[in-house]
Amino acid sequence: MGLSLKARANPLAVISEQVRILSTPNGSALFSQKMATAGLFPLTATGISVFQINVGKLCNQTCAHCHVDAGPDRKEIMTRETAELCICALSQTEIPTVDITGGAPELNPNFRWLVEQSRALKRHVIDRCNLTVLLLEREADLAEFLARHRVEVIASLLYYRAAQTDAQRGQGVFEKSIEALRKLNALGYGREGSGLALNLIYNPVGAFLPPKQEAIEAQFKGELERKHGVTFNRLYTITNMPISRFLEFLLVSGNYEGYMQRLVNAFNPAAAAGVMCRTMLSVGWDGTLYDCDFNQMLELPTGSGLPQHIREFDASALARRRIVTGNHCYGCTAGAGSSCQGSVA
């Protein structure tokens, strides 16, 4: 069972069908019921410490399990006008961290401007980088730009071996990623005392939960340094969310029911209490506001009565908002939990 051919031909229909599938109880408690049992419903924000900006779905890679469904043919790109609204909203707050994501965020023509403006406001900036973008001819000076502005790089590297990485991301992606990591290391990224943070993201290639973050981090560090001379600071484990291309994989491979049950069985109240949406605000490429990047991909904006576009930004109202949840949220609350900065419990 997969998404219907009719849905696949229409991006909006794909999202609608995904929401329908994820709304089905699946023989298990709805997420809201689980949260109520844990004394966490309704889930509410506790402030905003991360202002996440998704600048679009354009990417130089097409990864098999991408929750953004990004790729070279995507046309959704944040305009300069919307980028300016983001900076205007940010300037009204003391939110310490700006997290710029995509797609490959660096391909947005306003990416560098967003970095410069955010740094001028003395905010810490994170770039969620797929690594291979650093090797594009048009981005020859990108690594130096990031270093000059003290941007934290959080880079996705599927695995420390080529076969697994290339199977999901395309032939030769692993070697290109290693080349990009060496380029970053040469600038001081991932080196002790440099102040240039280089962190990696790991998520499983199949329908299972990630291992303990500390254990897989040790494996990555040992293998990458021994075989490739590459160093980095931290590795974050992220659970594959049952949305977009990964949901399609689950449906086509017959793993959907089992995976959802695995997430439900691993529900952890401690992880649920620390989910990232409680301290994050996510801005879509068109300026729509969301509780997190995953809700953004399902087009589930902030709740009724709240500002739903960056032009309506109200820091006070958004900092204490009720968060929109659904069954996909089991992905962030299973086991040690999952967030943009890895496990939470």
Image: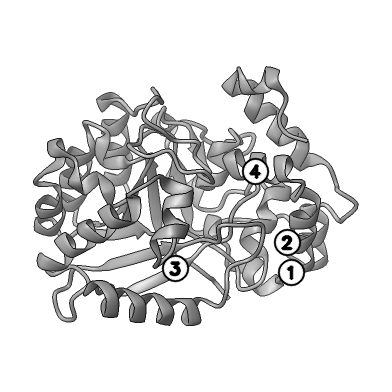
The three-letter code of the residue at mark 3 reads Tyr
Q: Could you give the CA–CA distance between mark 3 and mark 1, rounded to whole angstroms?
A: 19 Å
Residue beneath disc 3: 236
- Residue sitting nearer the eye, 322 or 154: 154
Q: Residues within 10 Å of mark 4 (few under 14, many from 20)?
A: many
Q: Residue at x 76, y 33 (%)?
A: 20
Going from N to C along the chain, the mark reached first, 3 or 1, is: 3
Going from N to C along the chain, the mark reached first, 2 or 4, is: 4
Residue 65 visible from this viewpoint: yes
Residue beneath disc 1: 266
Residue beneath disc 2: 263
Q: Position of residue 336 (x, y in %)?
A: 61, 73
Q: Are marks 1 and 4 in contact (CB under 8 Å)?
A: no
The three-letter code of the residue at mark 1 reads Ala
Q: Could you give the CA–CA distance between mark 4 and mark 3, rounded to whole angstroms?
A: 23 Å
- Residue sitting nearer the eye, 49 or 101: 101
The three-letter code of the residue at mark 4 reads Phe
Q: Position of residue 332 (x, y in %)?
A: 61, 60
Q: Are marks 4 and 3 in contact (CB under 8 Å)?
A: no
Point out the frontmost of discs 4 and 3. 4
Residue 249, label in figure: 4
Q: Residue at x 79, y 56 (%)?
A: 258
Q: Residues within 10 Å of mark 2 (few under 14, many from 20)?
A: many
Residue 96 visible from this viewpoint: no
Going from N to C along the chain, the mark reached first, 2 or 3, is: 3
Point out the frontmost of discs 1 and 4. 4
Q: Secondary structure at mark 3?
A: strand
Image position of 24 with respect to 108: above or below: below
Side of 265 where 190 appears, left or right: left
Point out the frontmost of discs 2 and 4. 4
Image position of 14 with respect to 115: above or below: above
Q: Which quadrant does the N terminus fall into?
A: top right
